[in-house]
Image (tube, rainbow, N blue to C red):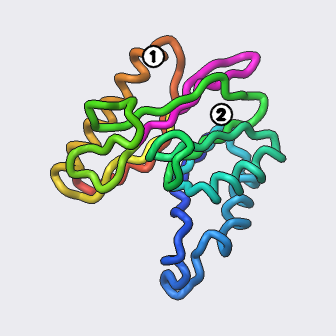
Amino acid sequence: PLKVMTVNMRLATTHDAERHGVDCQWAARRQAFIGIILREKPDFLGVQEAMPEQVHDLTRALTQHGYCCDGQSREGPDAPGEGMFIAVREPYQIASKGCFWLAVDTPFVPGSKASGAPHPRIAHWAKVESAEQQLVLVNTHFDNPTKDVNEANRVRSAEEVCHFLQHEFVDLPAIVVLDSNGEPNA
């Protein structure tokens, strides 16, 4: 059986110096965060809200333990800012990868942002292979907050991820991990 993990890691920000009376900045939680991943040993990992320094730290730690890693900013290739992170553990390797922007008419224009959305949203994907298996891993983080326009963006995003898989990787099994930003009764 495959072991899959997804987590919204909470971006690295100085605003977390006193969150609920605890220092929750990245430096204070980095070792625990990485330790949980290494303890659980997922075959596939999808992380949302990863900042460049967090992608660097995760890549450095996980590659020492047999992981192939890739990060993608929601603003575009090599752009600074928040994004997605994928890691796959040996014997799997990333054969190809990419991303597309969600709930927009320009899904391949970096930084495209849906109407009413506070930030661009992406689907970061990787075709992964081992000697015995091929599959597609998609990691995404849907729009927020809870308003009608944002709910419509979330629905459209889910439809676009399904459409992508049905047209680009129709013959491969897929694993989708995400932070849906869904609310109860939504």
Q: Amino acid at mark 2?
A: Leu
Q: Is residue 141 left or right of residue 93?
A: left
In this view, 92 is above or below 27 = above
Q: Is residue 159 above or below residue 30?
A: above
Foreground pick, 66 / 105: 105
Residue positioned 50% across, 36% down in the render: 124
Q: Can residue 173 be seen?
A: yes
Mark 2 secondary-structure assignment:
loop
Q: In this rendering, does residue 3 appear at all?
A: no
Mark before the other along the chain sequence, 2 or 1:
2
Q: Report the amino acid beneath label 1.
A: Glu
Q: Is residue 102 left or right of residue 138?
A: left
Q: Which residues are magenta?
A: 122-137
Image position, residue 175 (x, y; %): 52, 31
Percent position (x, y) of residue 92? 72, 28
x and y, in percent, of residue 177 in the image = 49, 41
Please identify the quadrant where the N terminus is shown. top right
Label 2: few (<14), some or many (≥20) within 10 Å?
A: few
Q: Is residue 128 above or below residue 59?
A: above
SS for dot 1: helix
**Residue 185 located left or right of residue 176:** left
- What residue would you read off at disc 1? 168
**Nearer-the-camera pick, 8 or 80:** 80
Residue designated by label 2: 2
Residue 174 part of the magenta-drawn span: no
| Residue at left offset 38%, top offset 45% | 121
Kindly identify the residue that appears in the image at 52 percent across and 70 percent down: 13
> Measuring 55% from the left and 25% from the top, which residue is drawn there?
136
Q: Main secondary structure of the magenta part?
A: strand
**In 3D space, how far apart are the residues under numbered discs 2 and 1 (Cα atoms)?**
23 Å
